[in-house]
Amino acid sequence: MIERLIGRLRRHLTRPVVFFPLVAGLAVLAVYGVIELGLALTGRWERDLVRQMEHARDHQPKVLITRYEERLRAVRTALKARGYAAGATDAVMNPHTAEALRSFQRRQGLHVTGRPDRATVTALGLER
């Protein structure tokens, strides 16, 4: 009985009208499975990346950043007091500040870097 059922099923499945659409359907399901697996892995990777970025953001050395911002504001204020156009006194280094620093460094005979290095900050009277 089971052998007859298997034989009829084999004859039915091996007919081209049934076999090729069946293989095509299985191929589509396999591709869909691979795509779903890739999306799941990508989603997991993205969640891990977001988690790592949040961790890094939450554990940044805020003291160093704050000190840099305060130092940059103080440098701009000192440059403006000496007549240099240092730009806005926000916490972002911009071309105006760099050019003002270069001009100040040239006039003071310092190494021209355009950055608020230790020698420049000392010459501005902000550190001893």
Image (cartoon, rainbow, N blue to C red):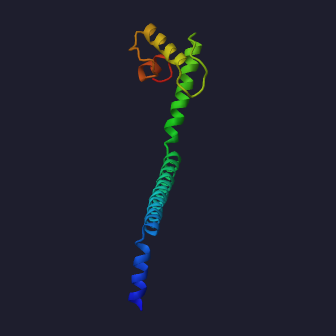
Residue 19 lies, in percent from the top left, at 43, 68
Residue 111 lies, in percent from the top left, at 38, 14
Nearer to me, 9 or 104: 9
Please name the residue shown 52% across and 24% down the image. Answer: 93
Nearer to me, 42 or 121: 42
Residue 90 lies, in percent from the top left, at 60, 26
Residue at the top extreme of this rendering: 107
Please name the residue shown 54% across and 35% down the image. Answer: 66
In the image, residue 118 above or below residue 80: below
Quarter holding residue 3: bottom left
Q: In which quarter of the image is the C terminus?
A: top left
In the image, residue 57 above or below residue 19: above
Please name the residue shown 54% across and 30% down the image. Answer: 69
Residue at the bottom extreme of this rendering: 1
Residue 92 lies, in percent from the top left, at 55, 27
44 relative position to 109: left or right: right
Q: Quadrant of the N terminus?
A: bottom left
Q: How many marks?
A: 0
In the image, residue 55 above or below residue 85: below
